Image (cartoon, helix red, strand yellow):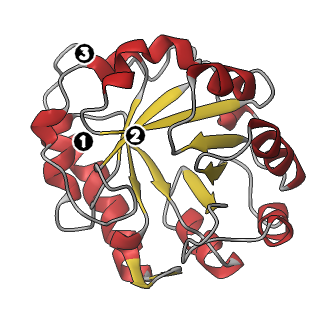
Amino acid sequence: LMFVKICGVTTEEDALLAVGMGADALGFNFVAGSSRQIRTATARDIVRRLPGGVLTVGVFRDELKERVVEVTHEAGLQAAQLHGRESSNDSSWVAQRIPYLIKAFTAGDAAMDGLDRYSASAVLVDAPEPGSGEVFDWSMLDGRERGRPLILAGGLHPKNVAQAVRIVRPWGVDVASGVESSPGTKDPVKVREFILNAREAEAAMEPTGEEFDPDAPRPYDWRDE
């Protein structure tokens, strides 16, 4: 099934809502100044109450690599998402110390030419202004990002996620503001529709032979936890 990550979770209620609707992953934002920023202790309390089978991800932007690892472990998270201009060396350093790393790039970023050097288990591509809630031109995806499972972000919402899945054919999709009633507060109807529309769009597609084999071993499968 299409991997779906609900990002910017700030409360236990929203976390359980997303999991109950079928989300594969939850993102907890540790970026200073963000309207969805969460304290490490709060994230830890939420994670402790979650059922198994969901990937918990800490989102960081240009944070010290030591701090990324520290917060990821303190909060009991399984993954970190580096959403800034982190170097390939710092990214690899983090990847060696946590189970699963997602490296985010903005669409068209030349740094994706060296994707292998980042040691990421998956690559996330966002709009040129991350967190803006704006959709970018999907034609900017030119294949450089395909060296790892591709997670598409940037302005997705229930009304356009099916089109995004059909055009881009990503491994997964990521959403925050597109399923909110207000910053940091998830809307149950939007969450349900987003996940349903993404999965239905994937199910309706004809195989191209390029998709990742769901039975193939992954660098880290959180479902084994």
Residue 139 in the image, given as x and y percentages of width and height: 10, 35
The residue to which callout 3 is attached is: 210
Q: Earlier in the sequence, mark 1 or mark 3?
A: 1
Measured Cα–Cα span from mark 2 to mark 3: 15 Å
Which numbered mark, 2 or 3, is in the foreground of this view?
A: 3
Residue 158 in the image, given as x and y percentages of width and height: 25, 67
Which quarter of the rendered picture does the C terminus lie within?
top right
Would residue 211 be seen by someone viewing this image from the given angle?
A: no
Q: Earlier in the sequence, mark 2 or mark 3?
A: 2
Q: Are marks 1 and 2 in contact (CB under 8 Å)?
A: yes
Q: Secondary structure at mark 2?
A: loop
Q: Is residue 157 above or below residue 26?
A: below
Q: Is residue 33 left or right of residue 208?
A: right
The residue to which callout 1 is attached is: 202
Q: Residue at x 30, y 66 (%)?
A: 133
Would residue 169 be seen by someone viewing this image from the given angle?
A: yes
